[in-house]
Image: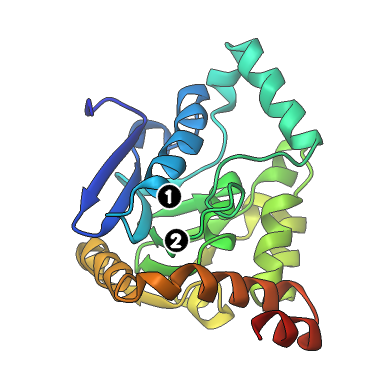
């Protein structure tokens, strides 16, 4: 795939990699990247050789949400995204699209706004020491909703609420994110991809039970204890 493509799709052994590739604009999502994401998730979901998926970014940012400037020049894409947001029909993450395979998010740098979707919706999250997290929606006159709701369900509601209400003024570093439970591990920046590959390969060792295990765990998170145990049986 051309190196100037906004989303790089790779396979490293049993692991599929989705790499945000717009480092000059913080890996913000343009119309093309948003078109590619559902296609890429489906490609890996349908490929039996891919047993786990890693999401990461190039450069000093992981993902900084929508590229508002680019979308303002593409009215059709802007209308489509606005419609999907109003209808809660987002098509960005593996959770949005019902991907059954384990997903590891490797946060290599700044994760802002829409980038928080990928953290909230991931099965496992590992972050570089240089990573940071913020939600600038309110600073731009927008509502902070989908991303922070998902993140608040993951862990530490108070810290998420503080970030949602204060906007760009509240930046969470990687070590704090680990303490809050947003990420499961923090590693040196130069070891992030290696560690993400290791984690993904570890989840890929038992492919026949992966989908059922993932379904049971997410169902348990979203429902009461009795319902979750009943579903597992």
Q: Which mark is residue 184?
A: none
Q: Which residue lies under the disc numbered 2?
A: 101
Q: Which residue lies under the disc numbered 1?
A: 45
Q: Is residue 159 visible?
A: no
The C terminus: image quadrant: bottom right
Relative horizontal placement of residue 159, taking residue 13 as reference (left or right): right
Contact between marks 2 and 1 (CB within 8 A): the answer is yes
Looking at the image, tell me whether mark 2 or mark 1 is earlier in sequence order. Answer: 1
Q: Nearer the viewer, residue 178 or 98?
A: 98
Q: Residue at x 47, y 37 (%)?
A: 37
Indicate whether 229 appears above or below 78: below
Indicate whether 55 appears above or below 6: below
The x, y position of residue 180, in whole percent, is 58, 79
Q: Residue at x 31, y 50 (%)?
A: 17
Q: Nearer the viewer, residue 78 or 142?
A: 78
Numbered disc 1: secondary structure: helix
Indicate whether 128 appears above or below 35: below
Q: Is residue 8 visible?
A: yes
Numbered disc 2: secondary structure: loop
Give the quarter of the image for residue 222: bottom right
Q: Residue at x 37, y 30 (%)?
A: 6
Q: Nearer the viewer, residue 91 or 206?
A: 206
Category of crowding for the residue at label 2, using alpha-carbon neighbours closer than 10 angstroms: few (below 14), some (14–19), many (at least 20): many
The N terminus: image quadrant: top left
- Callout count: 2
| Distance from the alpha carbon under mark 2 to that under mark 1 | 7 Å
Q: Residue at x 58, y 20 (%)?
A: 71
């Amino acid at each position: 795939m051309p190196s100037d493509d906004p989303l790089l799709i790779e396979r490293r052994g049993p692991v599929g990699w989705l790499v945000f590739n717009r480092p000059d604009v913080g890996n913000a999502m343009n119309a093309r990247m948003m078109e590619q994401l559902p296609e890429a998730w489906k490609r890996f979901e349908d490929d039996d050789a891919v047993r786990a998926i890693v999401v990461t970014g190039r450069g000093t940012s992981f993902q900084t949400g929508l590229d508002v400037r680019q979308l303002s020049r593409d009215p059709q894409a802007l209308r489509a995204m606005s419609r999907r947001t109003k209808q809660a029909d987002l098509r960005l993450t593996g959770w949005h699209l019902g991907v059954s395979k384990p997903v590891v998010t490797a946060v290599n740098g700044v994760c802002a706004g829409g980038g928080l979707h990928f953290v909230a919706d991931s099965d496992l999250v590992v972050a570089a020491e240089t990573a940071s997290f913020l939600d600038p929606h309110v600073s731009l006159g927008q509502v902070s909703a989908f991303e922070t709701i998902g993140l608040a369900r993951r862990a530490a509601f108070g810290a998420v609420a503080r970030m949602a209400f204060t906007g760009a003024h509240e930046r969470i570093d990687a070590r704090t994110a680990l303490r809050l439970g947003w990420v499961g591990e923090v590693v040196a920046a130069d070891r992030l991809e290696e560690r993400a590959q290791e984690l993904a390969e570890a989840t890929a060792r038992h492919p026949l039970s992966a989908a059922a295990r993932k379904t049971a765990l997410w169902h348990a998170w979203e429902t009461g204890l009795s319902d979750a145990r009943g579903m597992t049986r």
